[in-house]
Amino acid sequence: MPNYWLFKSEAETWSWDQQVARGAKGEAWNGVRNYQARNHMRAMKKGDLGFFYHSGGERRVVGLVRVLNEVHPDSDDETGTWDCVDLIAIAPLPQPMTLDRIKTEPELAEMVLVKNSRLSVQPVTESEWKTVCKLGGLDPSKLRTP
DNA sequence: GCCAACGTTGGC
DNA sequence: GCCAACGTTGGC
């Protein structure tokens, strides 16, 4: 059983399209400089699944990612404080779930995205995962995970 | 562009 | 160890 997460990025900084373009090589989720977010990444296991969320102008979940490599030092950090995981894009959400839509769904009222919008790497519960997938037009049981 | 929420820093 | 000041994030 994977655990579920949500990764936030401004499209101008690192977009879903760029993540997709990395293909099977994946990409390091570097640049996180927040302890809570870092600790969530430390808890991740290979094969865990996550939402890719565009913050800023778009404010919507645009796709699904998988943890390709577990936590390792952030190569951009010389202090040895910050870590990252490597992510691979696995599928777009057919109907991107906007923050507005998420906020209207009672089932999703407790999402960290709603409760603590500033946290850039967040845990997602299994029921939240399934709900967002389904409302986004994707059957979560059809996802193949290695 | 503004501002609320949150996290971090540093003086005491 | 407390808390005021400051910086950053992100929704609006």
Image (spheres, coloured by chain):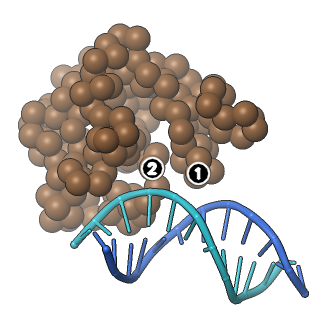
Chain colours: A brown, B blue, C cyan
User: Is the same chain shared between marks 2 and 1?
Assistant: yes
Looking at the rendered structure, the secondary structure element under dot 2 is loop
Task: Please tell me in which quadrant of the rendered image residue A2 appears.
Answer: top left
Q: Indicate the amino acid at tag 1.
A: Asn
Any part of residue A122 in sight: yes
Residue A86: x and y in percent read 48, 24
Which residue is depicted at the point 27% across and 21% down? A20
Q: Looking at the picture, how far across and down is residue A81, in whole percent?
A: 72, 40
Q: Estimate the x, y position of residue C1 in percent, counting from the top left.
A: 84, 77
Left or right of residue A27, residue C12 in this image? left
Q: Is residue A107 visible?
A: no
Task: Please give the name of the residue rendered at 31% of the width and 41% of the height, measured from the top-left corner.
Answer: A12
Asked if labels 1 and 2 touch by Cβ distance under 8 angstroms, the answer is yes
- Residue at coordinates 37% horizontally, 39% vertically from top-left? A13
User: Which mark sits nearer the N-terminus, 2 or 1?
Assistant: 1
Specify the quadrant that holds the C terminus of chain A: top left
Q: Seen in the image, is A18 located left or right of residue A106?
A: right
- For label 2, the residue is A120
Which quarter of the picture shows residue A137?
Answer: top left
SS under mark 1: loop
Chain identity of mark 2 = A
Q: Nearer the viewer, residue A66 or A60?
A: A60
Q: Chain of mark 1?
A: A
Q: CA distance from mark 2 to mark 1?
A: 8 Å
- Residue at point 75%, 38% (across, down): A79
Q: Residues within 10 Å of mark 2 (few under 14, many from 20)?
A: many
Label number found at residue A87: none
**Residue A34: numbered disc:** 1
Does residue A121 lie above or below A45 as drawn?
A: below
Residue count near mark 1 (Cα–Cα under 10 Å), binned few <14, some 14–19, many ≥20 = few
* Picture coordinates of residue A113, whole percent (x, y): 35, 57
- Above or below A109: residue A6: above
